[in-house]
Amino acid sequence: MSDPIRVGVLVSGRGSNLDALCAAAASAGFPAQVVLVISNRRDAGALEIARRWGVPAEVMPVGDFAGDSLARDRAMRERLRAAGVRLVVCAGYNRILSDDFLTAFPDAILNVHPSLLPAFAGGMHAVEAALDYGVKLTGCTVQLLEPGVPDGGPIMIQRAVPVRDDDDAASLRERIHEQEWQAVPEAVRLWCEGRIRRAGRVIRVVSASPATDPARIPAESHP
Ligand code: GRF
């Protein structure tokens, strides 16, 4: 089997998706290895998760860059490149990445969002917004990030979660998280196996094709 793809993970919070990804990566035959975690917050629980899995973690708050988020993104880009990262996963990263960063990893940045996009896009309160709106079905989305509308990138995986009448934000968020813990490792696996094809913003998963370099998602025309 070829060497696992080197993955970098950006985090800001608790790190349960990072935990799920590291657990998947520790299983036999998983095609990715988490080699670097970068947090923009010193108090992120994800840093402890990284330590437990033995993954190097760095903290890059924007305050260390005189409040210049572009400078911070450039520093992150260089750290990820130096670590040989080919796929970046935003697992609860709470800042919008600069175009400079996004274009440095074309078709190679995954993001997880706690709603069925395009519903409840943008912002950090998608779970509360879904409850307030009264939807009966929500869920999670794993998408590719690219310059443009935040949360507007092509969709790789969605998993639905029914809303219960007695849900509050905490209970609904927990069930969405349970789906994310499946969806994020699955998206990473598909990407690393070179099984992603895109036509415009439409992504299709194909059966295994070992000859494909996953870093270059082949374009295809609509069937
Ligand atoms: C997830 O719900 C994700 O969808 C959102 O932030 C949350 C991160 O959770 N972007 P965790 O830090 O992985 O536990």
Image (cartoon, helix red, strand yellow):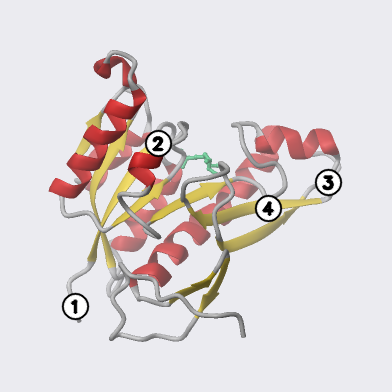
Find residue 127 and name its label. none
Q: Is there any visible trace of residue 48 in the rendered image?
A: no
Real-space CA distance between mark 2 and mark 3, rounded to the nearest whole angstrom: 32 Å
- Report the residue marked by disc 1: 2
- The label on residue 98 is 2
Q: Are marks 1 and 2 in contact (CB under 8 Å)?
A: no
The disc, 2 or 3, on the residue closer to the chain's N-terminal end is 2
- Judged left or right of residue 105, residue 134 is right
Pointer 1: residues within 10 angstroms few (<14), some, or many (20+)? few
**Residue 18 at x, y = what percent?**
38, 47
Spatial CA span between label 1 and label 3: 44 Å
Quarter of the view holding residue 154: bottom right
Q: Disc 1 vs disc 2: which is toward the camera? A: 2
Image point (29%, 70%), residue name: 31
Q: Residue at x 34, y 40 (%)?
A: 100
What's the residue type where badge 4 is placed? Leu
Residue 110 at what x, y percent from top left? 43, 54
- Which circle's residue, 1 or 2, is located before the other in the chain? 1
- Which numbered tag is attached to residue 116? 4
Amino acid identity at mark 2? Ser
User: Is residue 122 visible to us here?
Assistant: yes
**Location of the C terminus (image quadrant):** bottom right
Q: Which residue was labeled with disc 3?
A: 135
